[in-house]
Amino acid sequence: MVDPEAYTYDDEVIKKAEAMGKRGLIDIRAKEDSFIFTVESTGAVKASQLVLNAIEILKQKLDAVRLSDDTVEADDQFGELGVHMRGG
């Protein structure tokens, strides 16, 4: 595939191949360990650096929730994320 971001799956291509008598010609499978997302930047910070910064902040927040003994404090600080991390 030339541009995976431009593609949205529908089964029309598979149906078309079957209608042409070419069953099995096209095989579309999701990659279980990947996804595509877009990051936009004003240019002050590179998009790749924004992603790395966001991952670091998320890791810190997840660690804080995991280590928090005070669930009320975690709820106040992290809202739904804190509840989710505690299995609530």
Image: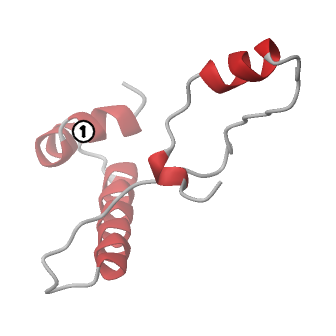
Q: What residue is drawn where x is 36% and y is 33%?
A: 84
Q: Is residue 5 above or below residue 87?
A: below
Tell me the residue at 23%/67% (across/down).
40
**Image quadrant in which you'd find residue 23:** top right
In this view, which residue lies farthest toward the front? 20
Task: State the quadrant of the C terminus.
Answer: top left
Per the image, the residue denoted by label 1 is 71
Please name whichever residue, 78 or 19, is drawn nearer the observer in this view of the structure. Answer: 19
* Picture colour scheme: secondary structure
Q: Quadrant of residue 39?
A: bottom left
| Residue 5 visible in the displayed image | yes
Location of the N terminus by quadrant is: bottom right
**In-image side of 64 versus 33 (left or right):** left
Q: Position of residue 10 (x, y in %)?
A: 56, 24
Residue plotted at (27% across, 84% down): 46
Q: Amino acid at mark 1?
A: Thr
Viewer-closest of 19 and 24: 19
Q: Secondary structure at mark 1?
A: helix
Vertical position of residue 4 compared to residue 59: above or below = above
Residue 75 appears left or right of 22? left
Q: Position of residue 32 (x, y in %)?
A: 68, 42
Q: In this orientation, which residue lies closer to the viewer: 2 or 61?
A: 2
- For the point 70% across and 15% down, the residue is 15
Q: Is residue 11 visible?
A: no
